[in-house]
C-alpha cells in the first residue's frame, strides 16, 4: 500500500544566467493550496488537543470524521470514558505536536475492514500530571508520538479520524479507583488453524494427539466465524474489553474476543483471510523467541512453523493485535524469581512492541492455569500480577480447565477463555450467545 503524499511543487523561474546559477526567484515555494491544507490540519490538531488538555471532550465530537464517531457507542459514552481515564495523576498537563506528514492508511483497530487512505498525520506527545504514580509502570512513556490522523476534506473543514491519545484503543492507564464492572464476553482461544496433522509426521502418539488437540481445521474455523456473523457478534480487542472494565465504556451487542496462542503460522495462513471477510479483529499472543522458526526433531518429525516478523508487523498494521505469550511459551511464570519474570515476559513484550510500534499490555500465561477455574488464585499468582504490572502489563488471559465468559474488573489478571477444540460446529458457540 502506498503512502499518500502532500505535494510541494518547486517553481523555478526562467533565467538567462550561466549554467548552474540560482536566481532569487527560483527558490522553492510550496503551492498556496498545499500550505493551506497543512495549516488547516495543524490548526485542527492544536484545537483538538487544547480541548483534550482542558477536558472539553464534548466539543471534540463535531471535529471527528463520521467513521471516527462510529467507533464509539455515543458522544456521551466517549466523554464519560475520557473523563474517567484522564483524571488525577493521569490528567493532561501539556502536549506537543510534530510536523504534518502524509499518513499511512488508517485502519480501525476494532474492525480491519474499515480503512481510509489520504490522511495527514501529526505526532502527539502528552505530558501527564504524575507519571511516577501511574499504573502500569512506564505507561506515561506510551503517550509519546501517538498518531493523530486528520482528513483534509478538500477545501472543506478537516476532520479527525485517528484520535491519538483520545482513541478508545489508546494505551490503557489503570484508574486510581476502578469501577466494578462485569459482563459476559466470550474470549475464544485458538492455537492451530490448519488441516489435521498427519500421524506419520509425528514421532509418538502423544505428540500427535497434542497437536491434533490444538487444531481447528480451516473449514471448521470458517463455520464458526459464519456463526458469529449470523448472530451479529462484534469482535473486539482486549483493549476494548478493558475500556469497559476500567472506564465503564459500554460494550457493543454480542461482544466476542478472538485470540490465537503460540504464534503459529497457520492462523496467519488460514484464519486471517476469514477474519478479514467478516471484518473481525483478533489478538495474537506471540512467544517472541519462536518468531520465524521452523521447529522439528533431528529426524524431521513433529513439524511446527511460526510466523515471521514480517507477518507479525503486517498483522499489527492491518487492524490486528499482538500481545505477549512469554519468550518460548515453555515455562509457567508463577513462582519464578522476579528477574526471570522480567526476562521471560518484560523483555519479550519490549521486543514485540519494538516491531509493531504498539505497547504490549496483555499476556497469555504459559501453561495451563493451576486451578480448575479462572477465578482460582494463590499467593504466587498474586505476586506475579504485581510483578507484571511493574513491567507494563494491565491484564492476563488464562487457560483454565473450565470455560467461562464472565469478565470482571477485579479479575482482569485472570481473564477466562473458551477453548476451541477440534471438530466443533459453528453452532457449538450458541451457548455463549444465547
Image (spheres, rainbow, N blue to C red):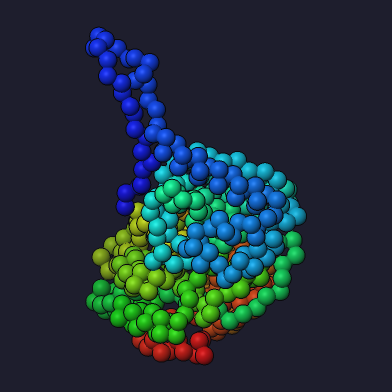
Please tell me which residue lies in front, 344 or 58: 58
**With respect to residue 59, does 409 lie above or below?**
below
Q: Residue at x 31, y 77 (%)?
A: 218
Residue 195, image quadrant: bottom left
Q: Residue at x 65, y 47 (%)?
A: 50
Please tell me which residue lies in front, 276 or 339: 276
Please tell me which residue lies in front, 246 or 26: 26
**With respect to residue 17, does 358 lie above or below?**
below
Q: Position of residue 98 (x, y in %)?
A: 53, 39
Q: Is residue 118 visible?
A: yes
Q: How many marks?
A: 0
Please tell me which residue lies in front, 337 or 248: 248
Q: Is residue 417 visible?
A: no
Q: Residue at x 49, y 56 (%)?
A: 161
Q: Is residue 193 left or right of residue 36?
A: left
Q: Position of residue 421 (x, y in %)?
A: 41, 82
Residue occupying the far front of the picture: 155
Residue 390, image quadrant: bottom right
Q: Is residue 55 left or right of residue 163?
A: right
Residue 96, image quadrant: top right
Residue occupying the far top of the picture: 18
Q: Position of residue 418 (x, y in %)?
A: 50, 80
**With respect to residue 179, does 82 lie above or below?**
above
Q: Position of residue 25 (x, y in %)?
A: 36, 18
Q: Residue at x 54, y 76 (%)?
A: 252
Amino acid at each position: 500500500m502506498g503512502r499518500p503524499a502532500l505535494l510541494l511543487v518547486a517553481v523555478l523561474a526562467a533565467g538567462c544566467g550561466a549554467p548552474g546559477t540560482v536566481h532569487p526567484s527560483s527558490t522553492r515555494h510550496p503551492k498556496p493550496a498545499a500550505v493551506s491544507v497543512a495549516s488547516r490540519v495543524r490548526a485542527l490538531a492544536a484545537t483538538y488537543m487544547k480541548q483534550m488538555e482542558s477536558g472539553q471532550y464534548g466539543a471534540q465530537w463535531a471535529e471527528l470524521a463520521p467513521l471516527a464517531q462510529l467507533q464509539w457507542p455515543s458522544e456521551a459514552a466517549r466523554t464519560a470514558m475520557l473523563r474517567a481515564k484522564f483524571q488525577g495523576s493521569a490528567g493532561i498537563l501539556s502536549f506537543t505536536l510534530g510536523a504534518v506528514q502524509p499518513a499511512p492508511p488508517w485502519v480501525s483497530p476494532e474492525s480491519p475492514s474499515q480503512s481510509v487512505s489520504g490522511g495527514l498525520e501529526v505526532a502527539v506527545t502528552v505530558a501527564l500530571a504524575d507519571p511516577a504514580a501511574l499504573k502500569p509502570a512506564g505507561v506515561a512513556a506510551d503517550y509519546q508520538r501517538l498518531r493523530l490522523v486528520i482528513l483534509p476534506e478538500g477545501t472543506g473543514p478537516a476532520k479527525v479520524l485517528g484520535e491519538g491519545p483520545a482513541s478508545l484503543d489508546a494505551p490503557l492507564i489503570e484508574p486510581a479507583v476502578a469501577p466494578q464492572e462485569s459482563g459476559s464476553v466470550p474470549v475464544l482461544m485458538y492455537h492451530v488453524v490448519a488441516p489435521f496433522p498427519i500421524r506419520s509426521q509425528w514421532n509418538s502418539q502423544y505428540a500427535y494427539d497434542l497437536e491434533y488437540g490444538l487444531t481447528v481445521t480451516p473449514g471448521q474455523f470458517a463455520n464458526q466465524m459464519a456463526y458469529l456473523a449470523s448472530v451479529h457478534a462484534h469482535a473486539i480487542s482486549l483493549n476494548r474489553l478493558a475500556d469497559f472494565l476500567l472506564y465503564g465504556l459500554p460494550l457493543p451487542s454480542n461482544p466476542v474476543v478472538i485470540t490465537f496462542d503460540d504464534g503459529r503460522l497457520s492462523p496467519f495462513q488460514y484464519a486471517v483471510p476469514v477474519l478479514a471477510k467478516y471484518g473481525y479483529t483478533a489478538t495474537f499472543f506471540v512467544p517472541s523467541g519462536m518468531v520465524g522458526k521452523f521447529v522439528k526433531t533431528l529426524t524431521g518429525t513433529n513439524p511446527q512453523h511460526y510466523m515471521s516478523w514480517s507477518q507479525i508487523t503486517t498483522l499489527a498494521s492491518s487492524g490486528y493485535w499482538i500481545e505477549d505469550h512469554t519468550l518460548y511459551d515453555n515455562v509457567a511464570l508463577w513462582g519464578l524469581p522476579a528477574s526471570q519474570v522480567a526476562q521471560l515476559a518484560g523483555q519479550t513484550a519490549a521486543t514485540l512492541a519494538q516491531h509493531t510500534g504498539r505497547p504490549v499490555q496483555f499476556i497469555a500465561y504459559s501453561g495451563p492455569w493451576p486451578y480448575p477455574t479462572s477465578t482460582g488464585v494463590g499467593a504466587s499468582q498474586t505476586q506475579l500480577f504485581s510483578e507484571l504490572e511493574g513491567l507494563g502489563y494491565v491484564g492476563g488471559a488464562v487457560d483454565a480447565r473450565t470455560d467461562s465468559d464472565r469478565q470482571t474488573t477485579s479479575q482482569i489478571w485472570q481473564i477466562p477463555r473458551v477453548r476451541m477444540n477440534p471438530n466443533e460446529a459453528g453452532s457449538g458457540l450458541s451457548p455463549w450467545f444465547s
